[in-house]
Image: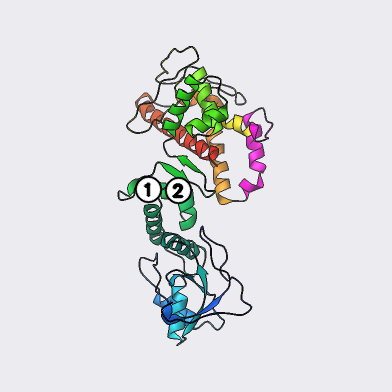
Amino acid sequence: MEGGAVSRCPGSGNAEAGGGTAGQGEGVYSIAIRSLLPADSARLEGEDRDHILRLTEVGTPLPPILVHRQVMRVIDGMHRLRAAMLRGEEDIEVTFFDGSATEAFARGVEMNVAHGLPLTHADRRAAAVRIMAAQPQLSDRVVAERTGLGARTVASLRRSTAQLAGSDRRVGANGRSWPVDQARGRRLAAEFIAAHPDASLREIARAAEISPSTAQDVRKRLQQGRDPLPRGRASSGASPSPAVPESGAVPQAPAVPEVPARPASAWSPDSGTAKVWRTAAECGLACADRPEVMRRLMKDPSLRHTAHGRELLRMLNAQFANAGDWSGLADTVPTHCAEAVAGLAREAAAAWERFAEALDHR
């Protein structure tokens, strides 16, 4: 260890809470400062001199710093290390992290988001790009949680950063992976159903690498003579596969689906919301109409007591406020705006469908 003495501090526990994907060594150790390498920091502007000076004046012991055991490089705690050096100290207390350099960097970002001198928004965006460059398979939500950004921001960075390598799969926080091209999975499911009409939903899902609920939606679409891909879900460079009903005929899906006026409590089997209510019923919401579903969701503390949960409830309320009078809404759109509004409506429908797919894959 470059000649630096290492001794365990008696009676010390693990001062750094929480581990990353790689293990963090237990206990606190006293390390010679000269044996440590400076951090591979996510701070674009480097260390904050004023913050270091403030730390030198702290009268109580500072928390141990986190060090990458394999290379003895600081992961989190450079300001504390600099403060110790200014005070003339030769040793510093550390806890160890075991893992790759990529995992060590991501762990350092996580810790600087959670405590100490916060990373700036620019720091966190740059860190997200670096993490995705090293691990392109990570889902937007995983990268967002590590960097303190929103999942939408991460998705935007992934799309707009040319040097990022592509990946045909995404891996979530639970370690499960799924294909990025959901349209391909739906087409494979349609082909499998055509070849094996009596296959179970789980068999279809396993063969096409999609969720059982998506397999159910594909089967239903084929039985109705519709395209297995919802509008806006065709992958780039590929045209959607035609629907293949049990009769073997290949009907053409209508260019613009008709949206009939219905009572607020009625369900449309062709609407994009039918899948949502069916899934809600499967989860134990024994409801017969949309207002009852919303009422129960509004009372759910796991949604009401989080910022993202409240935002989701507001979006759902806005989405269905006038859902029973689509014809009336359509009549208010001027003819010269109809094409633009229709495009935005389809884009919103596709966004909600992607959201439902993300829930299916959890």
Q: Position of residue 320 (x, y in %)?
A: 55, 33
* In the rendered image, the vertical position of residue 156 relative to residue 228, given as above or below: below
Count the marks. Answer: 2
Q: Position of residue 65 (x, y in %)?
A: 50, 73
Q: Is residue 329 left or right of residue 262?
A: left
* Front residue of this view, candidates 266 and 61: 61
Amino acid type, mark 2: Asp
SS assignment at label 2: helix
Q: Which residue is mark 2?
A: 140
Q: Which residues are magenta?
A: 282-305
* Front residue of this view, candidates 179 and 230: 179
Do tag 1 and tag 2 residues touch (Cβ < 8 Å)? Answer: yes
Residue lying at 52% horizontally and 31% vertically, measured from the top left:
205
Q: Position of residue 118 (x, y in %)?
A: 46, 66
* Front residue of this view, candidates 249 and 335: 249
Q: Classify 10 Å Cα crowding around label 2: few (below 14), some (14-19), many (20 and above).
A: many
Principal secondary structure, stretch drawn in magenta: helix
* In the rendered image, the vertical position of residue 64 relative to residue 163, given as above or below: below
Q: Is residue 331 magenta?
A: no
Specify how the rendered protein is coloured.
rainbow
Amino acid type, mark 1: Arg
* In the rendered image, the vertical position of residue 57 relative to residue 239, given as above or below: below
Q: Which mark is residue 301?
A: none
Q: Which mark is residue 158?
A: 1
The image quadrant of residue 283 is top right
Distance of mark 1 from mark 2, alpha carbons? Answer: 8 Å
* In the rendered image, the vertical position of residue 115 relative to residue 165, given as above or below: below
Q: Position of residue 359 (x, y in %)?
A: 54, 39
**Is residue 70 in view?**
yes
Q: Which residue, as the protein is rendered here, is positioned at the far left? A: 162
Pick the quarter of the image with the C terminus: top right
**Is residue 322 in view?**
no
